[in-house]
Amino acid sequence: MQSLPKGLAEDVARNLVMVANLLDEDPEQAYAYSRIALRLASRVAAVREAAGFAAYANQKYSEALAEFRAARRMTGSVELWPVMADCERGMGRPEKALDMAGAPEVQKLDKAGQVEMRLVAAGARRDMDQIDAAIVTLQSSELASNSVQPWTARLRYAYADALLAAGREDEAREWFAKVVESDKDGSTDASDRLAELDGVEFVDALGDDEDDEQGDAIAADAEPAERREAAGDDDAHGDDAHDDVDGDVDGDDIDDARDGVDDAGADKA
């Protein structure tokens, strides 16, 4: 953005920061900020790339692909090749994604980019109901490696999920366990998938306690009515009836609603 006037560059930068900050939590708002930046500086590669990722996060794949292509023309970089191929998948063209996976540009990607391209290609195979081919596509030295890299959890997860889709449940369980080992920040739901395979059932303690609290509230609301009924019986029957009602009321204690609950649906199996 060095080619922009200082004031304009600052405005564009602020919008790009908002795109980055909101992309995961509020993609629609991130997309809105990206459109502002695009109006301000459409000839800046970083702006076109940010606009592409914002559109991609909102499943606007055709728009995202156009922005990524523009950014690539400006920079000459192949870094966006895998996400461009995934846009083709999103547009219902898995065959095109596979063509891109075999293109010379893939050889120019760094290791992370090549793993990402492998994930996209496997996804395209699954789009075409070629589950066995997807499994073979994911088999690689990166998958077999015991070292944990930024892509390790996602690669292992995709492999485990493909094995499960192919009916190879025992192998899938083994690989979901490996995902849990490598997914230190909990970016996947591998622990839940593993628990499902192990037959672990989670109890919604919060829902049960809410039901209990509603029952307590109903009981508490009923108490004044009982007292009014008892008072009416006093007028009609005298002191003996009053004594009987007092005895009944003294025998009923309403429990207070509990202050908190424990979450029984644990994130980790």
Image (spheres, helix red, strand yellow):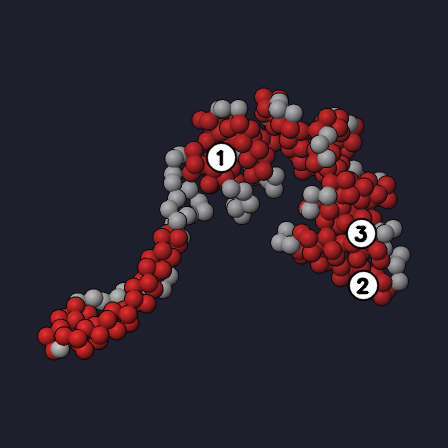
Question: Does residue 93 appear in this view?
Answer: yes
The mark nearer the N terminus, 1 or 3, is: 3
Q: Position of residue 262 (x, y in %)?
A: 37, 55
Q: Residues within 10 Å of mark 1 (few under 14, many from 20)?
A: many
* Residue labelled with disc 2: 10
Give the secondary structure at mark 1.
helix
Q: Nearer the viewer, residue 31 or 140?
A: 31
Q: Is residue 149 above or below residue 205?
A: above
Q: Residue at x 22, y 75 (%)?
A: 231
In the foreground, 129 or 102: 129
| Residue 82 visible here | no
Question: Looking at this view, is 13 or 91 the one in front?
Answer: 91
Which residue is pictured at 38% across the width and 38% down the height? 200
Q: Earlier in the sequence, mark 1 or mark 2?
A: 2
The amino acid beneath tag 3 is Val
Residue placed under numbered mark 3 in the picture: 47
The residue that label 1 is drawn on is 176
At x 72%, y 35%, the residue is 91
SS at circle 2: helix
Q: CA distance from mark 3 to mark 2?
A: 13 Å
Task: Left or right? Give the position of 234 relative to 176.
Answer: left
Q: Determine the residue positioned at 55% across, 35% down.
A: 157
Q: Decide: is 88 above or below 60.
A: above
